[in-house]
Image (spheres, rainbow, N blue to C red):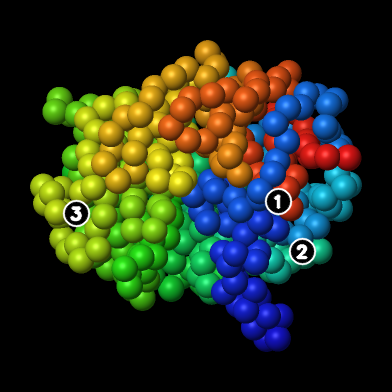
Amino acid sequence: MFRWFSLLVIAGTLTSPLLSGEHWPHWRGPNHNGTSSAVSIPTTWSQTESVLWRTPLPGPAPSTPVIWGDRIFLTSADGDDLVLMCLDTRGKTLWKRKIDNGNRDIRQGESNEAAPSPTTDGTHVWSFFGTGTLTAHDFEGVELWRRNMQKDYGTFGIYWGMAVSPLVVGDRLYLQLMHDGAQLVLALDKRSGKEIWRHERRSNARQESRHTYASPVMYRAQGNEWLLSHGSDYITAHNLADGAEIWRCGGLQKPDYNPFYRFVATPAVHDDLIVVPSAKGGPVLGLKPSGAKGDITDKNQFFAWKRSDQTPDVPSPLIHDGLVYLCRENGVLICMDAASGKEIYRKRTHDQRHRGSPVVAGNKILLTAMDGTISVIQTGREFKVLARNDMQEPMAASPAIAKGTLFLRTHKALYAIGSK
């Protein structure tokens, strides 16, 4: 009991300013939106320059490492096996646990069943895989519980494999499972894995538009605290007590319905603004939903702005210092005013496919391309490329930042980039 009480105390300070630069507990960082409080990170590096260490990994995965203190956790394929690994911040592998088997290659090497990223609260780590297996471990690698979500909630009917990352806040783990067979938002007790509530999310989405690869995210602003769920043509907000839907917003399809508009990018939240992406060049919404109830699709008072096109398809939005950054899959970076949605610039950064989501630290935005090139872009209203750094290894994961060190996961290795 003492261990779990301590865990709750730690989790309660998860996003405090004191801790936010020291840890990277979630795939989008301590604030769940790609922002870091680190003041300075490297600008230029290579496979050898500014590399503190490189640790080979057993296989590829697009999942992002998470970091707490001197521990790094990541999921990976290892041949047919699916594993959870723990390394220290010197690059030494402390333990590796086989969680499941049945890995499969997806999109010709872009992804696999290790696509979901783990999450940690500073005492325990939770992992989820496309096979449906969800586990909790302590920092020594002892398994505390496991469930198979396909066994408990139905076979995943999802074209590109289940890629949703779990969200741990307080004493709960949140997960969304949206595919041909189910449209579910779940809250579990993180200590036991037992269901606290489930919400069957109504949807009139058709075909592949029912498939969701985006992850749940928390909204805390204006006295409201909601779980946001994104998928099946809508973003919805849910009561934390019982999962009941509070509001929903559509308008994320183009006028001619496209049944292949599946959501991959996760919404970004900063203060009371939610930037809501869609799919395949579709709309992007800036929502300010305080006081919203029911369907707000046509209620303009809850919109800061609307864009009819240019959504990022896979990389999630980034909000920083009054600006919104959208990295499209083709490497085009769009910068907008966060208050009005007015476009400030639209520039190509690197002419390769981008899968990872952007992160920001200090005055630097990092964009990762599949060919292993990380573009470093200066923040602000003037577009400026500070560097392009080529890792010469395929990469689909998002960067992670902890204590001023940059962690990059390629399909072959985990790198720590920093000052020696």
Secondary structure under badge 1?
Answer: strand
- Measuring 34% from the left and 58% from the top, which residue is drawn there? 272
Instruction: Give the CA separation, mark 2 to mark 1.
Output: 18 Å
* 155 relative position to 231: left or right: right
> Which residue is denoted by mark 1 in the rendering?
402
Instruction: Give the CA separation, mark 3 to mark 1.
Output: 35 Å
76 and 310: which is toward the camera: 310
Q: Residue type at mark 3: give it.
A: Phe
Q: Report the residue that reaches farthest toward the top.
A: 351
Pointer 3: residues within 10 angstroms few (<14), some, or many (20+)?
some
Residue 40 image point, x, y percent? 69, 44
> Which residue is denoted by mark 3 in the rendering?
302
Callout count: 3
Residue 277 image point, x, y percent? 34, 38
Q: Report the residue that reaches farthest toward the front.
A: 382
Secondary structure under badge 2?
Answer: loop
361 and 314: which is toward the camera: 361
Task: Report which quarter residue 119 is drawn in.
Answer: bottom right
> Which residue is denoted by mark 2 in the rendering?
139
Quadrant assignment for the C terminus: top right
Pointer 2: residues within 10 angstroms few (<14), some, or many (20+)?
some
